[in-house]
Amino acid sequence: MFKQHLLLTFRNFKRYKSSFFINLTGLSAGLTCALLICLWVISEMETDRFHSSRIYQVVQNEHLGGAVNTVEGTPGILADALAEEIPGVESAVTASPGFWLAQSRIGTKGQPALKAAGRFAGADFFKVFSYPLLSGNKENVLSGRNTVVISESLARKLFGTTNVTGKELIWTNTEMEAESLAQITGVFKDLPPAASEKFDFLVSLDVMLRAGNGAYTKWGNYGPQTFVLLKDNTDPGQFNDRISGFMKSKGQENYTLLARPYADAYLYNRFENGKVAGGRIDYVRLFSLIAVFIVLIACINFMNLATARASRRLKEIGVKKAMGAPRASLIVQYLLESLLITFMALIISLVATGLLLPEYNKITGKALSLQFDARLITGLLAIAIVTGLISGSYPALYLSGLKPVRALTGKLNLSAQALWARQGLVVFQFAFSVILIVAVLIVYKQMEYVQHKNQGYDREHVLYFEIEGTFRNRVNYVVDAVKGMNGVVNASSIDRELLGDLSYTTGTFGWEGRNEEEMIRFQRADVNTGLIETLGITMKEGRSFSEKFGADTTAIIINEAGIRAMRLKDPVGKVFTLWGNDMQIIGVMADFHFESMHKKVGPMFMRYKPGNTNRVMVKVAGGKASEVVTQLERFTRAQNPGFPFDYKFLDQDFQAQYAAENKVAALSGYFAILAIVISCMGLFGLSAFAAERRFKEVGIRKVLGASSLNVIFLLSRDFTRPVLLAILIALPLGYVLSRNWLSSYAYHIDMQYWFFLAAGGVAFLISALAVLFQAWKAAGANPARAMRAE
């Protein structure tokens, strides 16, 4: 019986080539899209899940002026205090954020140093986290002074072996102004791809505490991160209740604590008013929905084409029923057809996925691959079966339910419900496609706005490099030497990356008329002379730093946002008390976007501290970048041996701030094109069947004097109406979704009516072309053929 069904299925594929091709192509494209998205979603969902579910990160909520700002930085002594004073903690550890030691160098005596990423970590790091050690004891591997644990890859690079316990190495980091000769006490296995934190070595916490001159041992100083491993029987909700007011007991009235699952931190990294409000999980949900809807669009094509060609199979159905074939047998036949097409499509999609993965990995920044393990095979089979059943269920139930007498007549009069169902599916297809087009257009326009909006500084032709080795004690010499190079417009130095969360402080400030209970969160930067000019930042009042004024060591420049927050009038010349020291405000600089445009420009100040700077910023003349880089390489080789010249352009950092949005824009664009193409393929097939079904009617109309234009209008109106309805439904939904997405930006475009008209127009035009082609073809046919058939 099964063999007979299989033979009939292949016979039908051969008989109805066009619908078979449309269904196979649509399902293949849809499944390829779904498979690519699933690989990415699985990768995102598995991030950090290899750790114990009992690991929690403790973050702080800053209560400032009625608003709540959540920060990951905590006092360096918080972990030990929680372990000692709060019940339910099995282990706790302090660790530095990944970016602190991300640009470090590590090596052995007499050998060139390698670039590597590191972290400061407390003694219980390997007791809290699930990183396996190849050598060393997790109980005490980081408990000694000046100790370091390195990855197996780094061990092989430095020593050619992983048997390195007891050996010494030297590591340096310019941003933390740290340098240390450390003893290797352990080697950890290379981090798995599912780890969100990437590091090559861990340094014992005592080094950090010394580097900060004791600042990290104070309750009012924040920066390091705190992680706890709860005991098995500890309820996370009760633990949060216990720690919420913990900071108040340490004299920090404006701070509360919150513990969040560490495994959730990667996906749920956005907070609003002190509560988790989403993050990368929003993109996971978005693309999961896109995958489901694109597969549904392909399934809808199958349903519509199967029911549309029902008139061709009426006699086949009638004969089978008259011969006594049960309805179940017919249902099996039609489901087998859909399942077989789906499995064919799955095979094609696997090949397509393999071919597309290299380019897809470039877009997503991942290293995804097809690994045919039991889980993937089970998932693929489930997707294929579910897709096949969804595609074939409606046609199977519909066709198998036809009455034998009605089927044998060869005439099929669709009920109003059946017609509405078919058109409703077309509406769903195009509504989703139009929403995607709207979303892509809005994202594109927002990214265009971000790229062209005045950021308040000049990022073009600005490169920077770290001050390392012997350069660290010769900052002004290096800056002056760079200024004298051909092609260099200006140069200066700063103590950290210009873009991003520079270094915030809510410390002790004072100014004329200050409300003592008011706290302001300032970003700060220590800079050299010429930094403001190098970056093209506008001075609104006063002047910038200059070596001509010896008193500039006690001078400060504040941005417009800071002056507004302080409500300070005529600020230039007034005193700003910073950490107990009186500083004179010598200028007010224009606001510039040191963070992404998701956030409003906040208060910021700059201090003249050339000795603290560790990054040289170089403004290069247009077309001179290559020449300047060559000179800098030569200069570094001669003046700073052992430290290769590495540089980045400021524009790269700017683009990195919007990497996620650019990926979303690119992927959404591809998926929108795919959705509209699949939808139009279905519409093309439906219009072809409609033209065939009304072939005789068209011939008679033409004989009676109907023009080709009349015929085209007659055949196309049944398909243009559902498309227009889909556009009317989709545009308001697209508006709401786009408005919600834009609300995550403090600075964004205004949505204009033409965005939506363009999206609807594109969808209508493409669909109209698909329908009009078939209508034009039918209108141009010789009416004699239809009359002869009659």
Image (tube, rainbow, N blue to C red):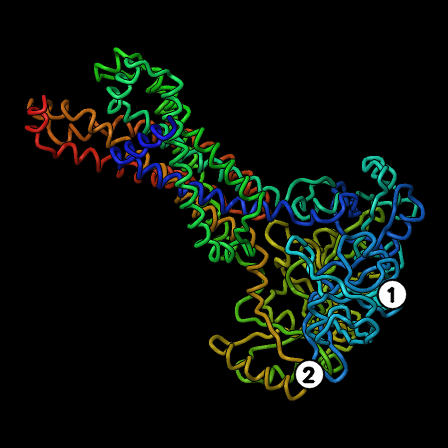
The quarter holding residue 763 reads top left
List x then y, in percent, for residue 510. 83, 56
Kind of residue at badge 1: Asp
The quarter holding residue 577 reads bottom right
Mark 1 residue element: helix
From the viewer's perspective, is 51 left or right of 763?
right
Residue tagged by mark 1?
206
Mark 2 residue element: loop
Residue tagged by mark 2?
642
Which residue is at 48% across, 75% downward? 622
Q: Residues within 10 Å of mark 1 (few under 14, many from 20)?
A: some
Q: Nearer the viewer, residue 357 or 223?
A: 357
User: Would you place residue 718 above or below residue 465 in this image?
Assistant: above
Give the residue furthest to the bottom: 638
The quarter holding residue 126 reads bottom right
Which label was assigned to residue 275? none
List x then y, in percent, for residue 241. 85, 36
Q: Are marks 1 and 2 in contact (CB under 8 Å)?
A: no
Q: Residues within 10 Å of mark 2 (few under 14, many from 20)?
A: some
Asked whether residue 442 appears in the rendered view, the answer is: yes
List x then y, in percent, for residue 215. 86, 62
Asked whether residue 731 appears in the rendered view, the answer is: no
User: Would you place residue 583 above or below residue 295 in this image?
Assistant: below
From the viewer's perspective, is 393 left or right of 638?
left
Quadrant into which the C terminus falls: top left
Which residue is at 75% across, 66% downward? 201
Tag 2 or tag 1, which sits nearer the N-term? 1
User: Would you place residue 255 above or below residue 298 in this image?
Assistant: below
Kind of residue at badge 2: Gly
